[in-house]
Image (spheres, coloured by chain):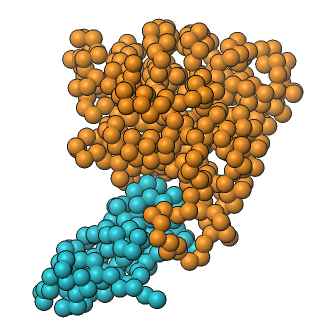
Chain colours: A cyan, B orange
């Protein structure tokens, strides 16, 4: 059964920003990538580092002359320990996307739907960010 | 299940357990000695009082390794101290993220600024090494009894290095000599033997640490020249360690200094079986040229060389690493190291595959305890609180 947890106001996470929250015994990173919100478990599947505290990156591609170019800037999280990279939207690793992934959770923005009214007052301007576990 | 590399056994669906970490491969309760921990002075000024006035005016002028910058940072991003100091400069953070978190009995400080060992100005290098040692003895070792110190030496002048080893080698928390593994000549050559004599006399092993291959007075980091990137260069660090171990055996260092141990840090272990077998094979036909090499090279290696795990090799089948442990008699030769707070830090509870408890105890604890001649019982918590006597 899916649990829905309200975690913060939409405006609290600017574009390119992230919040790390504790939800249902889990540490979860909520990312705003160009206005789209994603949630990743804050545990690297390699050695257990706090993945979501890593650096935001892009994907390095090759141009026509086989020289490196940066694409999709801000869409990749890089583990603060060993530098393993994961696509924030899918949770898939860049080096082995089929077999190595970090858990993702659906995120929705619901205006005027407030799960914890006492901590997060209603705001029409700011939607609420909820994560589904 | 393996979490090492990508094997057929790797999980297909990502884990959603509420635990803050994946299930540890190693359960708690294990005793751990970490043989490679990089602390750093918070600021250059901390060292200056220990430099003679002549060099104090020069300050700390080291190599910069701009040839091989790590594309992001060679340091753990989550280890930045709150006070804005450099990563590795905060003892409270080191205690929190390493000593306390993994309930370590001891951590061997190996420090930073190792490139002093490759400066062409040998007198300045020796003065820097001495100052660095006095700084660690006064600013780190007294604050936590779990910390063990290394004598930094600038091997480019063996006479001064030997003098430094004799000067502070009897300090109760000093457990080894430490030098950068890149040198101007193969390490087994007679030029360096004064260092080995001093270490033997003080009862200390000598640790070799890569990280500056190709810089300063050392040679190109590979026989084919300069690799093109940090990745390529970093992947080949074992080349230098192999060269040094081969030299130590062939020059008869382990016959001349039979009790002296060398610790090969930050090279992993998978290169060791090749060197053992190749040298044993060559020795059978070529030994007449090397009367000082009286036994199979692999016998000297098992007796006199120790290898630290980090960066631990992660074969697709993690069990293959256990086979390599068997090949090199890891129950005698392998010690654990984390390399905290560098980017390729190994978590002692997650980095290695599941091991038989007896072998695990040797690798994580007993081999290092014997190597450094540490008491069977670690300092009590109350002693820790009281600090150094």
Residue B361 spot, x, y in % from top left? 66, 41
Identify the residue shown where x is 27% and y is 11%. Answer: B52
Does B105 sit above or below residue B57? below
Residue B74 spot, x, y in % from top left? 40, 47
Can residue A131 be seen in this snapshot? yes
Identify the residue shown where x is 59% and y is 53%. Answer: B27
Does B272 sit above or below residue A132? above
Does A97 sit above or below residue B257? below
Pick the residue in front: A77 or B3: B3
Pick the residue in front: B127 or A12: A12
Pick the residue in front: B52 or A116: A116
Residue B59 spot, x, y in % from top left? 25, 22
Q: In which quadrant of the rendered image does the C terminus of chain A lie?
A: bottom left
Does B382 sit above or below residue B67? above
Identify the residue shown where x is 42% and y is 31%. Answer: B382
Residue A69 spot, x, y in % from top left? 37, 67
Residue B7 falls left or right of residue B139:
right
Can residue B242 be seen in this snapshot? no
Q: How many marks?
A: 0
Residue B66 falls left or right of residue B290:
left
Residue A115 falls left or right of residue B33:
left
The answer to which image quadrant residue A18 occupies is bottom left
Name of the residue lying farthest toward the front: B382
Identify the residue shown where x is 56% and y is 50%. Answer: B28
The answer to which image quadrant residue B30 occupies is top right
Name of the residue lying farthest toward the right: B285
């Amino acid at each position: 059964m899916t649990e829905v947890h309200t975690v913060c106001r939409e405006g609290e996470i600017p574009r390119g920003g992230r919040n790390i929250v504790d939800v249902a015994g889990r540490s979860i990173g909520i990312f705003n990538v160009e206005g789209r919100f994603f949630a990743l478990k804050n545990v690297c599947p390699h050695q257990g580092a706090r993945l979501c505290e890593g650096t935001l990156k892009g994907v390095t591609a090759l141009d026509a002359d086989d020289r490196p170019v940066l694409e999709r800037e801000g869409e990749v999280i890089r583990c603060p320990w060993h530098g393993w990279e994961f696509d924030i939207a899918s949770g898939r690793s860049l080096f082995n996307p089929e077999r190595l992934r970090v858990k993702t959770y659906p995120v929705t923005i619901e205006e005027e739907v407030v799960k914890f009214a006492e901590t997060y007052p209603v705001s029409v301007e700011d939607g609420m960010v909820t994560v589904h576990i | 299940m393996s979490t090492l590399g990508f094997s057929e056994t790797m999980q297909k669906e990502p884990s959603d357990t509420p635990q803050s970490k994946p299930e540890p491969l190693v359960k708690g309760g294990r005793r751990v000695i970490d043989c490679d921990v990089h602390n750093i002075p918070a600021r250059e000024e901390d060292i200056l009082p220990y430099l003679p006035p002549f060099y104090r005016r020069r300050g700390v002028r080291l190599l910069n390794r701009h040839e091989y910058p790590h594309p992001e940072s060679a340091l753990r991003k989550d280890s930045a101290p709150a006070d804005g100091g450099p990563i590795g400069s905060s003892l409270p953070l080191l205690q929190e993220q390493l000593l306390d978190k993994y309930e370590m009995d001891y951590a061997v400080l190996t420090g930073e600024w190792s490139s002093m060992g490759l400066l062409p100005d040998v007198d300045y290098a020796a003065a820097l090494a001495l100052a660095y040692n006095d700084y660690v003895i006064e600013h780190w070792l007294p604050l936590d009894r779990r910390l063990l110190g290394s004598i930094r030496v600038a091997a480019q002048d063996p006479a001064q290095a030997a003098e430094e080893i004799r000067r502070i080698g009897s300090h109760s928390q000093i457990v080894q000599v430490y030098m950068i593994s890149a040198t101007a000549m193969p390490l087994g050559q007679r030029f360096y033997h004064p260092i080995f004599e001093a270490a033997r006399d003080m009862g200390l092993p000598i640790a070799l640490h890569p990280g500056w291959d190709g810089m300063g007075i050392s040679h190109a980091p590979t026989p084919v020249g300069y690799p093109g990137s940090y990745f390529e260069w970093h992947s080949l660090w074992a080349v230098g360690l192999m060269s040094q171990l081969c030299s130590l055996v062939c020059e008869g260092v382990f016959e001349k200094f039979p009790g002296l141990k060398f610790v090969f840090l930050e090279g992993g272990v998978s290169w060791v079986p090749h060197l053992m077998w190749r040298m044993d094979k060559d020795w059978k036909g070529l030994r007449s040229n090397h009367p000082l090499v009286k036994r199979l090279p692999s016998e000297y290696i098992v007796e006199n060389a120790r290898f630290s795990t980090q960066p631990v090799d992660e074969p697709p089948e993690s069990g293959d690493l256990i086979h390599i442990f068997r090949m090199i008699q890891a129950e005698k030769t392998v010690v654990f190291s984390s390399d905290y707070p560098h980017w390729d830090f190994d978590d002692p509870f997650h980095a290695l595959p599941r091991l038989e408890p007896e072998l695990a105890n040797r690798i994580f604890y007993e081999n290092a305890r014997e190597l450094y001649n540490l008491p069977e019982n670690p300092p009590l918590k109350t002693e820790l609180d009281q600090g150094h006597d």
